[in-house]
């Protein structure tokens, strides 16, 4: 079978010589797919960036990478990457339909009319035909992921690297993206998927590599690895899925009312997201918010934080918190960090500005399983999961009264996810901070939350 990707002794190191990915070798043939499964920060994304030739300047890759027997490849027409952060791969100044059209016109070489027809076909297939003229910031994270996929493969690429392609998606859209990924290999291409989602790995099938701390622990067929793993880590990772979390007693919370929401209706531009939502929240209470992608979960957080005015209804605070005490943990943490400034400087800036207690940083770093050295790096040079935990650390420094966690652990592997949420819940309990958890994972929501709102039931139409 023809090998579309062949990697031999690929190693990634820092300029100081620290080894981040130990020598690895693998190949992917026509009609095959390989899934790399592992913890946050294990080096999965570095492996993909090495193949694409887009490692950060302070990192170096050695070894041999062949794409169809050549050392170089044609981006877009031969090889494409679906990045972990879809917003970072989309042009913020261009409507999403135009971005797909450009891939068809400039890369695939279609004429203008055919490119327009195919753009509409792709948007319709993705359930996004009514959003063709929307800009990336006007659509949800799940929608942005689907647009990024369409733009990536519209140039004709038949070798695709997908980095955490289903994070932040509801079960329906998650399944739709998995089907899109499977179409790459079923049509004779090659698919390399990076994920910590056991369900995704199982549905994709094919071969699996399990990584931890830059090391390859085991490799084999998906059916074998997922049913009879050999390494202790693979066993723990598979057992840590939220569906297998043991039941626990919900934490207690205060009788003091924090806020009341009555008949809340939210809209973006002229599009009504949901209508007539009611709930109340007490200090220290945990509220779960679920619903389909694009239903308005993130927008609810914007409204509670005073960033989006309600179309109708009221949000009533029973006491007036300081502005920095009502915080949102964003679905895409890179959007909340300056990309080229070391993380320790960014933390010091908010500590000085708001007179926060810097003595809590070592404790929170330890609790969040973060190496203190990570604060010397910039947001661009840490993994998505690591940056998400730094975002949680920064939010906890403010000792908020309300924390809106928008898919706050979607980039974390199941083991780290459970540990991080346990810490977040415990810190909120200690400080009587109300917590709103947004997730597409109903098992996770039921595990922690005192009450749950499904916004799909309030969706317009």
Image: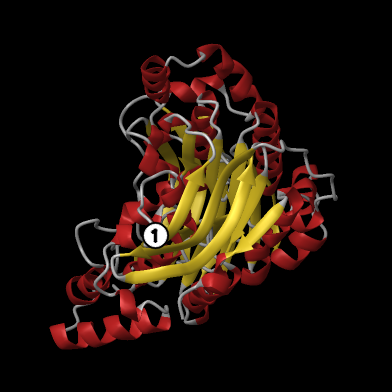
Q: Position of residue 107 (x, y in %)?
A: 22, 71
Looking at the image, residue 346 lies above or below residue 226: above
- Residue at the spot x=43%, y=14% of the render? 355
Looking at the image, residue 198 lies above or below residue 254: below
Looking at the image, residue 153 lies above or below residue 49: below
Q: Position of residue 160 (x, y in %)?
A: 43, 65
Q: Residue furthest left?
A: 112
Q: Quadrant of residue 225?
A: bottom right
Name the quarter where the N terminus is drawn: bottom right
Q: Report crowding for label 1: few under 14, some 14 to 19, many 20 or more residues within 10 A (C-alpha).
A: many
Determine whether, in the image, residue 372 is placed left or right of residue 69: right
> Viewer-proximal residue, 427 or 86?
427
> Viewer-proximal residue, 297 or 242?
297
Q: Position of residue 137 (x, y in %)?
A: 31, 57
Q: Quadrant of residue 135?
A: bottom left
- Residue at the spot x=41%, y=32% of the render? 323
Q: How many marks?
A: 1
- Classify mark 1: helix, strand or loop: strand
For disc 1, the marked residue is: 81
């Amino acid at each position: 079978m023809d090998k579309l990707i062949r990697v031999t002794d690929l190693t990634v190191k820092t300029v100081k010589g620290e080894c981040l990915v130990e020598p690895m070798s693998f190949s992917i043939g026509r009609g095959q797919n390989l899934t790399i499964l592992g913890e946050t920060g294990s080096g999965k994304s570095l492996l993909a960036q090495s193949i694409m030739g887009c490692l950060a300047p302070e990192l170096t890759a050695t070894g041999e990478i062949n794409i169809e027997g050549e050392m170089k490849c044609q981006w877009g027409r031969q090889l494409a990457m679906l990045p972990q952060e879809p917003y970072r791969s989309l042009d913020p100044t261009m409507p999403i339909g135009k971005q797909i059209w450009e891939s068809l016109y400039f890369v695939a070489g279609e004429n203008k009319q055919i490119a327009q027809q195919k753009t509409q076909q792709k948007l319709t297939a993705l359930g996004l035909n009514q959003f063709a003229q929307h800009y990336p910031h006007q659509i949800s994270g799940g929608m942005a992921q689907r647009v990024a996929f369409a733009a990536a493969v519209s140039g004709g690429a038949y070798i695709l690297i997908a980095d955490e392609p289903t994070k932040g998606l509801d079960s329906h859209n998650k399944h739709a993206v998995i089907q899109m990924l499977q179409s790459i290999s079923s049509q004779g291409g090659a698919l390399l998927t990076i994920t910590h989602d056991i369900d995704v790995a199982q549905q994709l099938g094919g071969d699996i590599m399990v990584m931890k701390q830059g090391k390859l622990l085991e490799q084999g067929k998906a059916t074998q690895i997922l049913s009879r793993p050999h390494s202790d880590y693979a066993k723990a990772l598979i057992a840590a899925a939220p569906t297998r979390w043991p039941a626990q007693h919900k934490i207690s919370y205060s009788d003091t009312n924090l806020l009341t929401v009555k008949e809340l209706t939210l809209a973006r531009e002229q599009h009504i997201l949901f209508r007539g939502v009611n709930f109340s929240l007490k200090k220290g209470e945990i509220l779960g918010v679920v619903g389909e992608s694009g239903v308005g979960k993130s927008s609810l957080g914007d409204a509670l934080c005073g960033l989006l005015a309600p179309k109708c209804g009221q949000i009533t605070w029973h006491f007036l918190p300081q502005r920095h005490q009502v915080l949102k943990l964003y679905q895409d943490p890179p959007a909340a960090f300056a990309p080229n400034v070391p993380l320790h400087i960014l933390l010091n800036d908010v500590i000085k500005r708001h007179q926060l207690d810097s003595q809590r940083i070592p404790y929170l770093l330890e609790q969040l399983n973060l190496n203190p050295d990570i604060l010397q790096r910039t947001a661009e040079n840490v993994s998505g999961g690591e940056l998400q935990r730094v975002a949680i650390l920064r939010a906890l420094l403010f000792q908020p009264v309300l924390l809106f966690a928008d898919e706050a652990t979607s980039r974390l592997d199941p083991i780290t996810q459970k540990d991080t949420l346990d810490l977040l819940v415990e810190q909120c309990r200690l400080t009587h901070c109300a917590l709103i958890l947004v997730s597409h994972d109903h098992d996770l929501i039921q595990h922690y939350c005192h009450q749950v709102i499904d916004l799909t039931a309030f969706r317009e139409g």
